[in-house]
Image: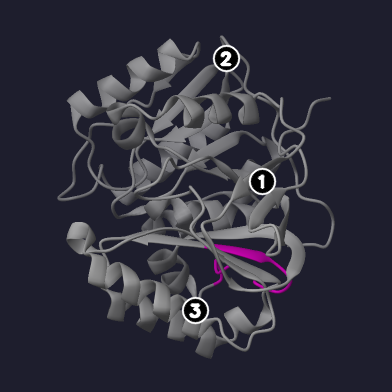
Amino acid sequence: MSSTAPIKPPPLKPGDTIGVVATAAAVEREHLERGVRELVKLGYRVKVSDHVLARDGILAGADYQRALELMRCFGDPGVRAIFAARGGYGSGRLLPLIDFDLVRRAPTIFLGFSDQTFLLNAIFKLAAMVCFHGPMVAKDLAGGIGARSASHLRRLLAGELDGFEMDAREVLHPGAAEGELIGGCLSIVAAMLGTPYAPDFAGKILLLEDTGEKAYRIDRMLVQLRHSGALSSVAGVVFGGMRSPQDEESQRRLIRRFAAEQTTGLGVPVLWGIEAGHGTENFTLPIGARARIDAAACRLTVMENPVCRA
């Protein structure tokens, strides 16, 4: 990505149309319908892609089909935002099939997290566009997100927030730093290393969160990030939700210890426990927007409006 400011998509207003696409694992009809109803309650129109309920083994249809439907949404002038139906697995298979030039020419809000971390970071890197780490339709929205998270999502995408703050639970390492926000699900960030789609880590604020991973696996992925040089080049790190299997207390303590150990000696601020990602209120964060870590205040601040208001 060039050193110029990233492209910001137009805002999403009440009455606008959201396109819902399945880029990853197969989607359950009941969950999708519940999530769509929640979007309608929030005041949006919804256009579900033609093959959103398709199945090809564990995937929501063939790779080419899922990629095509995503591209159709980006190319549809009536769609003002694209929300992922769910994560799970499969988005990484689409990366060679994505037309990033089309995405750049037709900037549209893209929202998802978990397995969508593949697309969030690739879109920011290769289309130079801000996108959004947040709740998905047939998972989080289907279960009903909290009122605070829903209000934040609506206001952020509408362009009503010229910045916002998120408090962390704990400081792992002191300091202050600024940079563009990248990252998301730790296991996906680690899987992207060594590929053309891997984030540019230099000078960035790195968000990491995950779920269902035992402490030793979290440590192994953090070691991989450290050995690759990714961690040594970031400006700062902020950890979101880090859910262990069965949410075991002993595993939670060990994961926190490993996170502190693998970020020791980097000379950058590291925060633990913001409400983003799995097992949290999952407040929406703009990937590619400028952010600041202030460990003295135990706070992450997004410093700009992530959508264009012209």
Residue 250 at x, y percent in the picture: 24, 72
- Residue 147 within the magenta-colored segment of the rendering: no
Part of the protein shown in magenta: 196-207
Could you tell me the amino acid type at mark 2? Asp
- Relative vertical location of residue 7 with respect to residue 293 in this rendering, above or below: above
| Residue farthest to the left, as pictured | 57
Q: Disc 1 or disc 3, which is closer to the eye?
A: 3
Q: Magenta part mainly helix, strand or loop?
A: loop
Depth order, front residue of 104/18? 18
Depth order, front residue of 296/60? 296
Query: In the structure shown, which secondary structural element does the residue marked by tag 1 occupy?
Result: loop
Which residue does the numbered mark 2 point to in the structure image? 16
Q: Is residue 241 left or right of residue 205?
A: left
- Residue 205 within the magenta-colored segment of the rendering: yes
The circle drawn on residue 260 is: 3
- Relative vertical location of residue 37 with respect to residue 269 in this rendering, above or below: above
Residue 251 at x, y percent in the picture: 26, 71
Residue 36 at x, y percent in the picture: 35, 20
Could you tell me the amino acid type at mark 3? Ala
| CA separation in Å, label 1 and label 3 | 29 Å
- Say which quadrant the N terminus sits in: bottom right
Which residue does the numbered mark 1 point to in the structure image? 130
Q: Earlier in the sequence, mark 1 or mark 3?
A: 1
Q: Disc 3 or disc 2, which is closer to the eye?
A: 3
Depth order, front residue of 158/147? 147
Could you tell me the amino acid type at mark 1? Val
